[in-house]
Amino acid sequence: AEFAKKFAQGFFGFDDEPKEKLEPDYPYSVFGLKKSSSDEDMKSAYRKSVLKAHPDKGGSTELFRKVREAWEYFTNYCK
């Protein structure tokens, strides 16, 4: 079971825990928001950021990945 969990995490590119030390206002800083922002503000900023960062819309794969990781972190740890 442990092997399957590790494999799935590595395969899909998402880990349960962040790898590096994050800045104090992460993930809000990725979306240009303050920590006091509402969930609706965060959702709106995420949607705008994902459109700008998407490789099919002129963004880069790396930027898109950072936006997705910040959103995953927010939904898992900040609510």
Image (cartoon, helix red, strand yellow):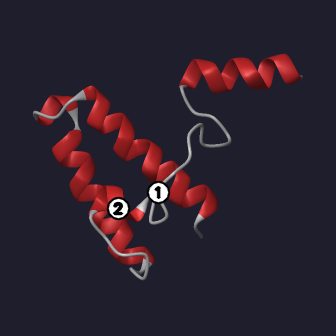
Is tag 1's residue or tag 2's residue first in the polypeptide sequence? 1
Tell me which amino acid carries mark 1.
Glu
**In the image, is residue 66 above or below residue 47?**
above
Residue at image point 22% right, 37% down: 54
Horizontal side, residue 63 vs residue 13: left or right: left
Q: Give the image location of residue 35, x and y in percent.
A: 43, 75
Residue at image point 22% right, 57% down: 48
Residue at image point 46% right, 43% down: 69
- Viewer-proximal residue among 64 and 51: 64
Residue at image point 44% right, 58% down: 27
Q: Give the image location of residue 46, x and y in percent.
A: 32, 58
**In the image, is residue 24 above or below residue 19?**
below
What is the quadrant of residue 25 in the picture? bottom left
Tell me which amino acid carries mark 2.
Ser
Image quarter (top left, top right, bottom left or bottom right) of the C terminus: bottom right
Residue located beneath label 1 in the image = 23
Residue located beneath label 2 in the image = 29
Give the mark count: 2
**Other residues around mark 2 within 10 Å, as few (<14) / some (14–19) / many (≥20):** few
Question: Disc 1 on helix, strand or loop?
Answer: loop
Question: Disc 2 on helix, strand or loop?
Answer: helix
Query: Where residue 7 is drawn, which disc sits there?
Result: none
Q: Residue furthest left?
A: 58
Q: Give the image location of residue 73, x and y in percent.
A: 54, 52
**In the image, is residue 46 above or below residue 34?**
above
Horizontal side, residue 13 vs residue 38: left or right: right
**Other residues around mark 1 within 10 Å, as few (<14) / some (14–19) / many (≥20):** few
Image quarter (top left, top right, bottom left or bottom right) of the N terminus: top right
CA–CA distance between discs 1 and 2? 8 Å
Q: Give the image location of residue 8, x and y in percent.
A: 68, 22
Kindly check if marks 1 and 2 are in contact, taking CB atoms under 8 A apart as contact: yes
